[in-house]
Amino acid sequence: MAAFQILRRDLLRYLRNPGRTALLFAIPLMMAAIFAVVFGGHGDGDGITIRVLLWDEDDSLLGRLLQGAGDRPESEGRLEVVPVGPEGVEMMNRGDASALVHLPKGFTRAVIDGTPTAIEVVKNPAQRFLPLVVEEGVVLGATVLSAGSRALRPELDVISSFLDADHRPEDAAVASLSASFNRRAKQFDLYLFPPVVRLEAVDVGAAKGEEASAKKPQGIAAVLSVFLPGFAILGVLFLAQSATRDMLHDRETGVVRQLLTAPVTPASYLVGKCLSVLVVSAAGLGLLVAAGVAAGVAWGPPLAVAAVVVAAAVAASGTLLLVMSVVGSERQGDALATIVIMSWCMLGGAFVPLAQMPAFLHPIARTTLVYWATSAFSSLIAGGGIADILPNLAVLAGGGALGIAIGAAVMGRRLARGAL
């Protein structure tokens, strides 16, 4: 059949020129790798570790609390606090840590006396995000200390007088100070016991049970689970763009005219080209999913993933076929298709997770196939099944089929007029 001969011809052309295809695959994979390295750390896959050098010249209570924070079980593998001396500056010059926290001599007494003091934070310029985490943590601690120094000023003044005295404080004075602290603590009971604001962390998919939680990817695989679905859709759109552009290339080089002089009807030509776009898109997205599996991404039930791959390929093919049917040249098609692809990927959550985008953009995102494809993959990665993504499959397959039908009809009319 002529349509399958055209499909075979196109597939052989891709095999004979693997460089172009490899480049289209490289774009989403390189972007995913960059995001994984930036956000996934450089460890053994157990998560990000923030290494902080602590230079405590004052041997202060705050310094001991910071050291204790690094030893807490929940901080294991995430926060490492290393006590250092002046050599910490040289260690920072070598990039041995994310930041250096310096507590100057007399820091504790300054807090007690209510006199100005400072905590110095030296950030590692080679790292972008982790030093900011340390800085924000120190700012929070400094704010708490500053507020406490003001709120407890009468009691701290008494402590300061005790430190300045050349003899041990009287029992009555210590008892009075203790009673004053107790009265002050009761004033804060309303806000501290229980606290006004509580932090509650909920894992996505926790309702699926402990087994699903145990299988949740860690480290770089976790980062890829967030970003790779969007980048894979970006890749399949570029593949569909390349496949549909060939139709305009065939027209401009006279290939279409030659084929139609052979026993090939316009309908056979269009069916063959549509099959070519579908096969290339589905195969490309399948390979990108396989690359994710190799990197540790748990996409979900294989049959459900395969359904999303096919539906997304249909949607990408229909969209790009429709775009190419309304342009007059290969150059125009490239320009318009690139605008559509990049706009949809930015609005649909390929580059930034939809949850992080402003609420007013969410309805707009739902008009893009990128949203329906990435949300389907995300649902499966979070532990969902085929029933959870049926609306996504319907939108992708239905929208793609409509795009293919309209695009093929427009191109068919242009063939009949000799314009293609």
Image: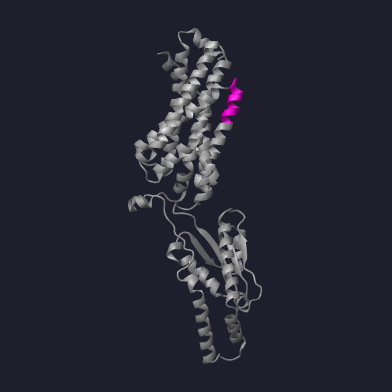
Q: Is residue 181 above or below residue 42?
A: below
Q: Position of residue 177 (x, y in %)?
A: 54, 85
Q: Is residue 412 above or below residue 373?
A: above
Could you tell me if residue 30 is visible in this image?
Answer: no
- Tell me: 119 left or right of 227: right
Q: Position of residue 148 (x, y in %)?
A: 57, 73
Q: Give the residue at the far right of this rendering.
A: 116
Q: Main secondary structure of the magenta part?
A: helix
Could you tell me if residue 150 is visible in this image?
Answer: yes
Q: Is 158 in front, or is 231?
A: 158
Q: Is 235 in front, or is 26?
A: 235
- Magenta stretch: includes residue 337: yes
Residue located 53% across and 79% down the image: 184
- Tell me: 314 left or right of 356: left
Residue numbers of the magenta segment = 327-338
Residue located 58% across and 27% down the image: 334
Question: Total of numbered circles in the picture?
Answer: 0
Q: Quadrant of residue 294?
A: top left
Q: Position of residue 50 (x, y in %)?
A: 52, 59
* Placement of the C terminus among the 4 image quadrants: top right
The structure's colour scheme is one colour
* Placement of the N terminus among the 4 image quadrants: top left
Q: Quadrant of residue 297?
A: top left
Q: Is 198 in front, or is 210?
A: 198
Q: Position of residue 127 (x, y in %)?
A: 58, 54
- Magenta stretch: includes residue 277: no
